[in-house]
Image (tube, grey):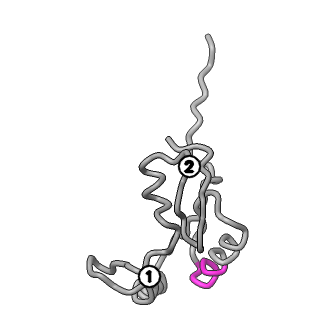
Amino acid sequence: MCDDIQLRVERNVIVFAANACALGVRWFGDGRATSRARVRGNDASVDEALTAAADALRGASRALIYLAPDISCEAQRSTIAIADALHATIDSVTSATTMVVATSSA
């Protein structure tokens, strides 16, 4: 498990991740966004992937937009604007997703 990760960045590239496990090192990579994407199993440019995602969302009859945990206010604002434009349902980790079972003592 990774905890208290400290990143060293040189020239906008992550060059070291202290306290990171192997999975954490792979997850951070060098900090640059990938220029590779896949659409329907085929290599595609990032622009092509974004267009395919937008087309899929526009074509959805009941889109669900899920807000991931720990995202910035700016990301939430943009996501909610997209959901609003799509007339989509919004969900997040803060919604009640567990069932509480009450037991009585005899």
Which residue appears at 27% of the width and 81% of the height?
Answer: 42
Query: With respect to residue 15, does 49 lie above or below?
Result: below
Query: With respect to residue 89, does 6 lie above or below?
Result: above
Where residue 31 appears, x then y in whole percent? 52, 68
The quarter holding residue 66 reads bottom right
Instruction: Classify 10 Å Cα crowding around label 2: few (below 14), some (14-19), many (20 and above).
Output: some
Query: With respect to residue 58, does 34 lie above or below?
Result: above
Looking at numbered disc 1 in the image, what kind of residue is underneath it? Ala
Is residue 103 toward the left or the right of residue 61 in the image? right
Where residue 39 appears, x then y in whole percent? 33, 80
Which residue appears at 46% of the width and 79% of the height?
Answer: 61
Boundaries of the magenta span: 81-87
The foreground one among 105 and 58 is 58
Residue 60 on the magenta span: no
Rounded to the nearest whole Å, what is the CA distance between mark 2 and mark 1? 35 Å
The foreground one among 6 and 101 is 6
The quarter holding residue 65 reads bottom right
Instruction: Classify 10 Å Cα crowding around label 1: few (below 14), some (14-19), many (20 and above).
Output: few
Looking at numbered disc 2 in the image, what kind of residue is underneath it? Ala
The foreground one among 102 and 44 is 44
Where residue 44 appears, x then y in whole percent? 34, 85
Name, please, the residue furthest toward the left.
42
Where residue 78 appears, x then y in whole percent? 66, 78
- The residue indicated by pointer 1 is 53
Is residue 28 toward the left or the right of residue 80 in the image? left
The foreground one among 88 and 74 is 74
Q: Quadrant of the C terminus?
A: top right
Which residue appears at 67% of the width and 70% of the height?
Answer: 76
Is residue 47 toward the left or the right of residue 44 in the image? right
- The residue indicated by pointer 2 is 18
Query: With respect to residue 73, does 60 lie above or below?
Result: below
What label does residue 79 carry, if any?
none
